[in-house]
Amino acid sequence: MGPPGAGKGTQAGRVAGERGLAHIATGDMLRAAVRDGTPLGLEAKAVMARGDLVSDDLIIAMFRERLAAPDTEAGVLLDGFPRTEAQAAALDGMLTGLGRRIAAVIVFEIDEDTVVRRLSGRRMCRASDHVYHVDFNPPQVDGVCDVDGSELYRRDDDDPEVVRTRFRKQWVEAAAPVIAYYRGHGVVSELDAAQPVEDVARALDGLLDGLAAHG
């Protein structure tokens, strides 16, 4: 868990690949179910076509279906779920019924100003979405993609004020009850996500190695 810009996606992809875990991102799972035309996917498609949000019960049912796949046997890494205390409780109930459990909730701690600097400095190329950063990975020519020469631009959701709003609403306000729920279960660990990416990776690996050592 962590706010937008904390580096969760970068680390999740690496950890899942290196440790043979299934990386389950809610959005990807939902899109795959719709694309494949599964019964749950068709139900979700109808809900979204009406402009409604997919219910917690439907998302939990999709997780149950997803956990039946062979690639989840070694463990799973959840990305983007649960987002509410009710979802966390429902997920626990479903996992208990399957003889599984949440082993750890790793919280990526990072301050608002650092997140704003990371995201507001990001630039995308219009041709192929190559990613740059004005401070950490600048192009050779300002405003021009090194690969295809197309214009670089800042996404609307990377505007500093938008980033601050997302940080406060999606993280400070929305995540607090979920983290409190998992603290009550004794499974929360914090990680300093403001460090360089290599240091974050080492710290994360240390936490995961500790989990493996204790079963």
Image: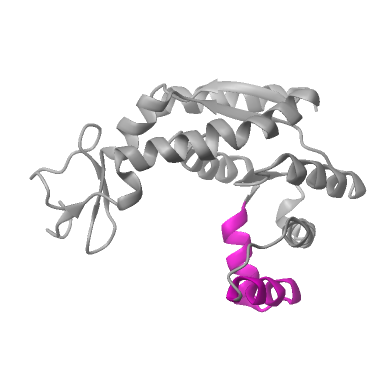
Q: Quadrant of the N terminus?
A: top right
Instruction: Kindly tell me whether residue 1 is visible in this rendering.
Output: no
- In the figure, 207 relative to 116: above or below? above
Give how far across and how far down residue 209 sits, in percent.
66, 25
Q: Let me know if residue 89 is in the magenta part.
A: no
Q: Closest to the observer: 69 or 27?
A: 27
Q: Residue at x 79, y 58 (%)?
A: 64
Instruction: Give percent across and percent down for residue 102.
Output: 77, 37
Q: Which residues are the magenta region? A: 25-49
Res 166 quadrant in image:
top left
As drawn, is 189 to the left or to the right of 130? right
Camera-nearest residue between 156 and 91: 156
Q: Residue at x 79, y 61 (%)?
A: 61
Q: Residue at x 29, y 52 (%)?
A: 155
Q: Quadrant of the C terminus?
A: top right
Viewer-closest of 131 and 41: 41
Q: Position of residue 182 (x, y in %)?
A: 74, 29
Q: Is residue 29 left or right of residue 108?
A: right
Q: Decide: is 119 above or below 104.
A: below
Quadrant in the picture for residue 92: top right
Task: Examine the residues drawn in magenta and state their main secondary structure.
Answer: helix
